[in-house]
Image: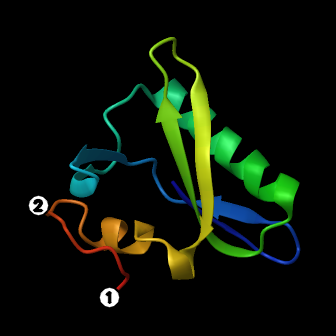
Amino acid sequence: MMITRGRDGETAGYPVVETVQRDHICHLVKAPASIPVAMASRAADIARKAVETVGCVGAMGVEMFLARDGNILINELAHASTTPAITRLKAASAPNLKTTSAQ
């Protein structure tokens, strides 16, 4: 999920997306993710709290995993300038996405 946070602490988020990985390459991004609305809301809350907790400012990619038991686990927080999430947002419907840098 991409989330932005201003110096004043105000946050805004993009819809939660779902990625399909093959051989460690992102091949497909589903936007929005095909998960229940309540789960997407929970993921957005977790992402927001993570960004607030570490004091991030700017656009951040919060990578999460949905565990089989329904728990949402944070894998990584990355500043948008260093994450392919921006490209993923722009190319959300493009299959076989192999680009890993924002364009």
Left or right? Give the position of 90 relative to 84: left
* Image quarter (top left, top right, bottom left or bottom right) of the C terminus: bottom left
Residue beneath the point at 46% across and 30% down: 37
Q: Position of residue 25 (x, y in %)?
A: 25, 57
Q: Quadrant of residue 77?
A: bottom right
Of the residues shown, which amino acid type is indicated by label 1?
Answer: Gln
Tags 2 and 1 in contact by the CB under 8 Å rule?
no
Q: Position of residue 72 (x, y in %)?
A: 58, 29
Q: In the image, which disc is placed on residue 96? A: 2
> Which residue is situated farthest in the left direction here?
95
Residue beneath the point at 85% across and 67% down: 9
Front-lying residue, 40 or 98: 98
**Up-down relation of residue 64 to residue 36 (above or below):** below
What is the crowding at mark 2: few (fewer than 14 residues within 10 Å), some, or many (at least 20)?
some
Left or right? Give the position of 28 relative to 90: left
What is the crowding at mark 1: few (fewer than 14 residues within 10 Å), some, or many (at least 20)?
few
Q: Quadrant of residue 95?
A: bottom left
Residue beneath the point at 41% across and 25% down: 36
Left or right? Give the position of 88 relative to 70: left
Left or right? Give the position of 3 relative to 96: right
> Which residue is situated farthest in the front direction here?
23
Q: Quick one: label 2 or label 1, which is nearer the N terminus?
A: 2
Q: Position of residue 82 (x, y in %)?
A: 53, 78
> Which residue is situated farthest in the bottom direction here?
103
Q: In the image, which disc is placed on residue 103? A: 1
